[in-house]
Image: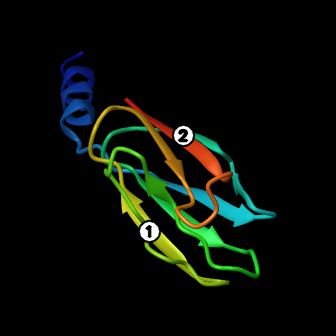
């Protein structure tokens, strides 16, 4: 019984590790366009299109900058809530990150 209690306390004391999520930019779309994450997680945006794109949060919480073909950028999600984003070059490209 005591061993199980110690193991349970150790499991609770272990640090939580942030996850990395992937979004591919291809065909003038973000795939997936809706991403659910935890606060502290990162998202890697990779451009597989033949033209430059960005992933820019409307609330200013993240921005990949200009991503040329084949380039990637990681962003860290630091606040809970919905974070709509778009390509600052191609306004029809949209998505949403929801963080809890």
* Residue 45 point in image, percent of width and height: 55, 65
Picture layout, residue 30 above or below residue 7: below
Say which element carries label 1: loop
Q: In which quarter of the image is residue 30?
A: bottom right
Q: Residue drawn 31% across and 32% down? A: 80
* Residue 45 located left or right of residue 40: right
Mark sitting on residue 64: 1
Q: Residue drawn 59% across and 44% down? A: 95
Picture layout, residue 65 above or below residue 5: below
Q: Residue drawn 19% across and 28% down? A: 9
Say which element carries label 2: strand
Mark sitting on residue 96: 2
Tag 1–tag 2 contact (CB < 8 Å): no
> Between disc 1 and disc 2, whose residue precedes?
1
Picture layout, residue 43 above or below residue 6: below
- Label 2, residues with CA under 10 Å away: few <14, some 14-19, many ≥20: some
- Residue farthest along the top direction in this orientation: 1
Q: Residue drawn 67% across and 63% down? A: 24
Whole-Å distance between the Cαs marked 1 and 2? 15 Å
Question: Which quadrant of the figure contains the C terminus?
Answer: top left
* Residue 7 located left or right of residue 49: left
* Residue 44 point in image, percent of width and height: 51, 64
* Residue 86 located left or right of residue 64: right
- Label 1, residues with CA under 10 Å away: few <14, some 14-19, many ≥20: some
* Residue 2 located left or right of residue 21: left
């Amino acid at each position: 019984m005591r061993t199980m209690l110690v193991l349970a306390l150790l499991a609770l004391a272990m640090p939580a590790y942030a996850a990395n999520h992937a979004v591919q930019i291809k065909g003038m779309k973000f795939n997936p366009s809706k991403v659910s994450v935890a606060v502290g997680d990162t998202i890697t945006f990779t451009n597989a299109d033949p033209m430059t794109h960005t992933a820019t949060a409307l609330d200013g919480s993240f921005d990949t900058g200009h991503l040329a073909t084949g380039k990637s950028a990681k962003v860290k999600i630091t606040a809970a809530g919905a974070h709509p984003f778009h390509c600052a070059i191609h306004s029809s490209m949209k998505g949403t990150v929801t963080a809890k």
